[in-house]
Each structure stands twice: as C-alpha cells, then as structure tokens.
Image (spheres, rainbow, N blue to C red):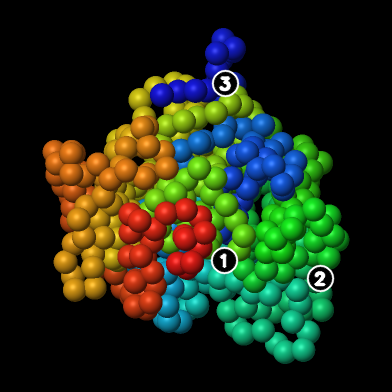
Amino acid sequence: MLLLAACTGLPKERRSASRPHVIWIVADDLGYADLGFTGCVDIPTPNLDRLAASGVVCTDGHVTASVCAPSRAGLITGRHQQRFGFECNLGSNKDGLLPEVPTAAGLLGAAGYECVAVGKWHLGYLEENHPLAVGFEHFTGLRGGSRSYFPKLEKRPSKAQRIERDGVEVAESEFEYVTDLFTEEACRLVRERDPERPLFMYLSYTAPHGPMHARADLFERFSGIEVEKRRKYAAMVSAMDEGVGRLLEALDAEGMTEDTMVVFLSDNGGATNNGSDNGAWRGMKGSKWEGGQRVPFVISWPRVLEAGRYDEMISSLDLLPTALGAAGAKLPAELDGVDLAPFLAGRRSEPPHEALYWRRFVAGAVREGDWKFLRIREVNDTLRSPILVNLAEDPGEIVNRAGEEPAMVARLSGLLEAWESQLSEPRWQEAEVWQNNQRKKHEMDLLGRDAERKVP
Ligand SMILES: [Ca+2]
C-alpha cells in the first residue's frame, strides 16, 4: 500500500549523488503523536516539520525494542541485538556491545566517512564499549542513559552521567542546558568537519526522557498547558526542535543540505512517566503494542529522494544498510535490514520486509503485513494464551483474534520461533519488577492511556 505523494508524475528519484553526509537524530522516549507532522496540536515543532516536509515521512517505521539500550544496539549495529545477547535493557556496568560486532561508525569509517557521536550513548560502560573505541572519531556526550538537563554544580556527576568531549570531562559550568549543549556540539562538528570526507553523525538527544527539566523560557511559553508534566515535556520537545532547526541551519550555511541524508526517529515510543502521547497507538515504552515500538520516522535526502510519505513497514535496522548503500559500500551479509533507497524512490514496489520481529526476554512478537502475534511468558515459564491482532481492521489492537484464527496463530508463532532459533541467549536480564511490568503491559484488559501510565 503506497501512499507516496508521488501522484504528481514527477520522477521520485532525482539525479544520483556522490556519497552523502549522513546524520541520524535520535529522540528519547518521544511520543508518536507529539510532533506537528504526526498530528500534535499543543506542541509546535516547526523545525522537525520542516525536516519532514523535505523528506519521506515513514508512517510504519519501527525500532527493534521498546526500551532504550537494546533499541540503540540494534540501530548502531544494523543487526538484531538479540543475535549478540543485547536483548535486555542495560543492567550492570559490565553489560554492553560486543567488540567483535561492528558498529555503524566502524563500517562507515571503513567506507571513508568521518564518524562523530553526540549525546546519549547507553551502549555499555566498559572502555571497549566507548564510542571512541567502536569507530567514532569524536564524541561529546554521556556514557549513560539519562542525566540532569541542568548543570550539577554542587556535586560532580557520576561517571555515567558526566559530559565528556573526546575523552576529556566537560565542566558542568560550561553549559546551561544539556539539550542545547548537544545542539551546539553537533553544529560545531558540522562546521569543523573534515572537508575531504563525508560526515556521519549520530546525534542522540536525551530529550524528552526524564528527568522532567524544562528550560525556563520554554516552560513559560507553554503556560497554556495545564498539566505540569505535559507542560515540561512540551518545553523539552521544543528545545530539541530548536536544536534540529539550528542543525538544519548549519547544514544550509555549509551548503550541505542537498547532499545530506538526515534521519529522525525516536528510540522507542512515549514513556509512561514523561507526559508523552502515542496518539492512536495502543501501549507505551516497554510494550510490544504499536505505541511501544512504532515511532516518528523521517528520512530526508533532498538530492535523491523526493519528499513524500511511505506507508510500508520499515525498521531502524534499515538505516545502516541505507547509509552504506548511499556510500556505495558493500553491505555486510550479517546486517538484518535493507537499503531503503530503492523503495523510497519508488524503484521497488514490494514491501521491504515480509515480517519484523521483537523479543525482550518475557515477551516476543512478530508482525507480518497487518497481522501481529504477541507471545508472553509467565512467571512460572508457561505461555499465556496468544494474542493476535489485525492492524488494518483494528489499529488500536483491542480485539484478540487468536481464538478465531488458529492457522494464523500457528503461522506467526512458527515464524517467531524460526527467527528465535538464530538468536543467542540474553547475556543479562532485567530485574524481576521490569519483567512483571512487561507482562502486565500486555494484559488485554489493561486499556486506555491512564491505565497504561500506571505500569512503568
Ligand atoms: Ca528511550
């Protein structure tokens, strides 16, 4: 089902380019419906809307997990993170990427790119997991998953939370608001890029993940929003939107816009605790309902891709093959995604994926076309009665069709098991409370956003 704005008769693929710059902008715990171009009415996002208008808005775009670290592990390696045991969210300081699994920076660096990372890392605290150890040449950000947005002047932040720039600690007195610091660093790295090489930037905002710290001027701007958490969230999303605007201006000023592939997505759906909203999708961060893993997703590459909309199912796993394809590099056979360019350009009309798969220890899911199957493992290791939904007829995933469609249950269950047979054991697990919360999130009668928000 293609609903590209392609009925204009214009060729969707413009003239081919030399290797483009590639920028991945990742938001953290952003709600699906919290941007102008996804229908938000109370938080204006003019800059993200401008990016969306310049590119292809993918309406059925997914990440590989509905919590931060495993989703990022899939994105940064282009492989299902369960293949190398990174199935669960980070636990101890010893968990993280495996050094033998190449990252986007390793592969794009080998293809001649200057690779830089800014913002949240959250892929392991060991030195071998550090961005500068896995192929990035510059890194400004924090190793951990979140921190205070304001400087911590009274007490030095923990090793996971302090900001470092190329291995040197950045004093808290050097910045006023973390989102703005990341934006400034991203713009600086654009201006100071190596002119001889294309740039790959991984810009990973912590916004709008908690803690709910709003910049005062933006908090003031949203005085019309009554619920305080939503008001702070609006300010945090706005700071990120401003940052994206400044980055787009930097690209314009450098004459890079036409030849830069800018991707924007969230690492997972809106969280239960930050005032976000996933609109029509059931579920929030941590669940395998669409609200957990279906995210705002834009791919802009003005030189090559005509702006429009793409409605087939795609994955964050596709971003690395798409970047390598644009670079003219050979795709390693181990990558799980596909180069999306021929699909987004309309040269290939079949869906890029027959099925997408998810698993985080106690819950697994597979989606094939409009059908989705969810399998929950209970505390006593038995399987809950399966859940089967049809997204075409029931986009809110309210009706469990498993009883009336046993053949489809068997088919999708078999697909899931076949995929699982290729995976490794999780190298660590989440605490029992998170496992139980994940089980609760998939109870059919846990319905409605207010109920969902009570199960973190
Ligand atoms: Ca997240």
Measured in 3D between alpha carbons, the distance from the residue under mark 2 to the one under mark 1, in whole angstroms, is 24 Å
Q: Residue at x 55, y 17 (%)?
A: 6
* Nearer to us: label 2 or label 1: 1
Q: What's the amino acid at mark 2?
A: Glu
Left/right placement of residue 226 relative to residue 295 reads: right
SS for tag 1? loop
Q: Residue at x 47, y 45 (%)?
A: 281
Residue 403 or residue 167, whichever sits in front: 403
Point out residue 224 in the picture as x, y percentages from the top left corner.
Answer: 80, 53
Q: Residue at x 80, y 61 (%)?
A: 219
Point out residue 307 in the picture as x, y percentages from the top left corner.
Answer: 61, 27
Picture quarter with the N terminus: top left
SS for tag 2? loop
Lower sequence index among marks 2 and 1: 2
Above or below, 155 relative to 114: below
Q: Which mark is residue 182?
A: none
Q: Which mark is residue 5?
A: 3
Point out residue 314 in the picture as x, y percentages from the top left corner.
Answer: 42, 39
Pointer 1: what residue?
273
Is the CB atom of the residue marked by disc 3 within 8 angstroms of ligand 1's nearest atom?
Answer: no
* Nearer to us: label 1 or label 3: 1
Left/right placement of residue 258 relative to residue 13 reads: right
Above or below, 186 relative to 122: above
Lower sequence index among marks 3 and 2: 3
Q: What's the amino acid at mark 3?
A: Ala
CB-based contact (under 8 Å), mark 1 and mark 3: no
